[in-house]
Every structure is written in structure tokens, then in C-alpha cells.
Image: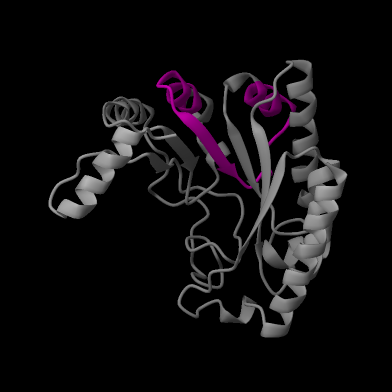
Amino acid sequence: MPGLQEKLNLLRGLLDGEAAYAGPFAVTVDVTRRCNLRCIGCTVHSPLLNPQALTNPPVQDFDAGMFEELCRELRTMGTRSLLVCGDGEPFLHPRLFDLIGLAKGSGFRTVLITNGTLIDETKAAALAASGLDLLRVSLWAGAPEEYEKIYPGTNPAWLDRVRNGLRLLASAKGAHRKTKPEVMLHAVINRHNFGSVGSLVDAALEDRADAISFSPLHTASGQLSSLGLSPEDEKEVLASLAALKERLRSSV
């Protein structure tokens, strides 16, 4: 966490309005634009927003040498956390674990966001040994029929692939006697999955995730309004989340 002096420097810069007296406390790095999915809510690859979206665009991966230089510069500015993600799927970056190593070697709390489809036994073992602090797995579907709607053109059996990857990681952490990376499932609530928040919580518990989070779908200035929730749907989701919160609290 930022110290008092760092917070005061940040406030000083905000009040000044002309100069910054503190660097960013956390930085997000998009390491690749390549992706193996076309999620309906993705601003880059959604077939609803961009029917001609390229699965493998010309601009592909963040250069590892540039990433190392970025880490050095951020450390001099007092940055504490690095979020590794992408307009695509980070596991498609050929040097992802080198990037994680550079981030951890620079002293950052390091978070990786992934769709989870590419975690096999080898990658699970590498994650357990990497020092990564948090793995956030974006999983929007609680059932195969939802997966097919939310990830069009993808085999709905990939839902099982994601969940198996989580179990492999849990086993690898156990084998290495590691508690990290912590695992968080994250779901964006939309018209296709709002009735399945309970199934997603079940998945988190069964696959030994450490946490689960939800957020509403951003409709991209109305372009995805057909995927949004009605007021009645929102009430149902809120009631479900309240009940699930009590259930989780009582199970601790």
C-alpha cells in the first residue's frame, strides 16, 4: 500500500493541477492483442461491436525488452502494483512467464487477467512457481449453453477446460506448498447469465478459487444495450447476490 508521504505527494499534484509529485501506484500493461475468444462484451474482439475483428491482429505482443525497461522506470516512480492483461489473451504471449518474472523481480505486486482457457498442467505448475500474486479468471458462464452464447464460435465444452485448469492450478499449488497465486473468478453480468450467479459461485467453491467478483455489463455507449438487464432482472440479481453473500458468510 502507498505510504503517507506518497499519498500526500499525490494530493499535492491534484491540488497543483500542473505537475505530478507522485508516480502511479498501480499500472496496467496490455501485453497482447491476440485472442482465442470473441467475447460478446469485448471492445476489441466482440462480433457485435466489430464483425470484422481480427483474431490475430497485425500489432501483437508487448516486447519483453520494453517491458523490462518499463519495470525499471515504474520502480523509480514508486509504483507498487502491475496488472498484466491484454486486449487479447495474455497466455498467447510467448514470453508471458518471463514478463511475470520481470515484474516480480522488480518488486511489484503482480496480477494477471486471463480467460482461463489455456491453463494446462504445465502452465499450472509454472503459475504456482512464478510468484504471481493474483490470477483473475474471467468466466461469464455458469453452463455450456450460456458459454456458447457469450463466447460465440467457441466450443461450449471449453467451460470444462477453464474449470479443469483451475483445479490443476489448485493441485499444483498444493504440490509446491504454495498459497499463491490467489485465484479470483470474475463474471460480467448480462442478459445471458444473470440467472446463473449461483452456478458461478458453485464453480468458485468446487474449483477452489479464493474469491469471486461480479460487475455489470458496460453497454459501450448503447451498442450492447440488447445484452443489458431490465430493472426486473437487476432486482433478481441483487436478491440472488444478497442470498449468496449470506451463504458464503455462513460457510466460512
Please name whichever residue, 148 or 57, is drawn nearer the observer in this view of the structure.
Answer: 148
Image vertical order of residue 191 relative to residue 210, above or below: below
Please name whichever residue, 158 or 180, is drawn nearer the observer in this view of the structure.
Answer: 180
Q: Toward which corner of the image does residue 132 lie, by quadrant? A: top right
Which residue sits at x=71%, y=57%? 154
Image vertical order of residue 243 relative to residue 207, above or below: below
Say if residue 157 shows up in the picture.
no
The answer to whether residue 86 is left or right of residue 231 is: left
Q: Which residues are magenta?
A: 99-128
Please name whichever residue, 203 or 145, is drawn nearer the observer in this view of the structure.
Answer: 203
Say if residue 236 shows up in the picture.
yes
Q: Residue furthest bottom?
A: 231
Residue 62 x/y as whole percent: 39, 37
Q: Residue furthest top?
A: 176
Image vertical order of residue 117 relative to residue 102, above or below: below
Residue 124 x/y as whole percent: 70, 28
Which residue sits at x=67%, y=83%? 230
Residue 197 x/y as whole percent: 78, 62
Please name whichever residue, 203 or 12, is drawn nearer the observer in this view of the structure.
Answer: 12
Which residue sits at x=69%, y=53%? 139
Please tell me how many numbered marks the rendered image carries: 0
Residue 107 x/y as whole percent: 43, 22
